[in-house]
Amino acid sequence: MKTPEKAPEKAPAKAPEKVPEKAPEKAPEKPAQKAAEELPEPPKDRKALEAAVKKYGVDAALEALQKVRVVDLRSLAREFNGEFGIAGREIRNANKKVLIDEFKAFLNK
């Protein structure tokens, strides 16, 4: 009788080499988005609004105005004394969209 042959022994498998993982790169932010994020808080008065426009630009200032309550937007509009597109009862009855549109028209002059 024949003796059974042994199967050839396999060499132990090597562990795969570890490749250092790279951190995913962030896409560069758009300047308008970055400026809007840097704006500390929505402007509460005329000086703060003018400073925000000068420092961050009209678009970032308008973004900040979106966060302001309608009552405060009306007060801010009244500070412009006739320079603004609407006055008096029109300001009192204006909703947020109308006020933001008026600020946009006024600031883009």
Image (cartoon, rainbow, N blue to C red):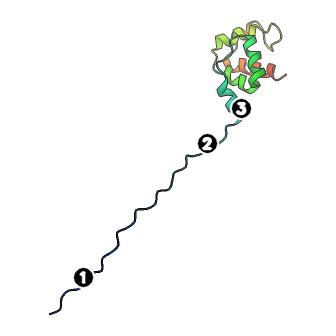
Which amino acid does the dot numbered 1 rest on? Lys
Residue 102 left/right relative to 25: right
Residue 49 drawn at (x, y percent): 74, 16
Nearer mark to the viewer, of 1 and 2: 1
* In contact (CB < 8 Å): disc 1 and disc 3: no
Q: Which residue is mark 1?
A: 6
Report crowding for label 2: few under 14, some 14 to 19, many 20 or more residues within 10 A (C-alpha).
few
Number of numbered discs present? 3
Q: Which residue is mark 2?
A: 26
Q: What is the quadrant of residue 84 in the picture?
A: top right
Separation of marks 1 and 2 at Cα, in angstroms: 57 Å
Which residue is at a point 76% across and 19% down the rendered structure image?
103
- Which one is earlier in the sequence, the residue at label 1 or at label 2? 1
Which residue is at a point 72% across and 17% down the rendered structure image?
99
Which residue is at a point 50% across and 56% down the rendered structure image?
19
Separation of marks 2 and 3 at Cα, in angstroms: 17 Å
Residue 11 drawn at (x, y percent): 35, 72
Report crowding for label 1: few under 14, some 14 to 19, many 20 or more residues within 10 A (C-alpha).
few
Which residue is at a point 64% across and 42% down the rendered structure image?
27
Q: Which residue is mark 3?
A: 32
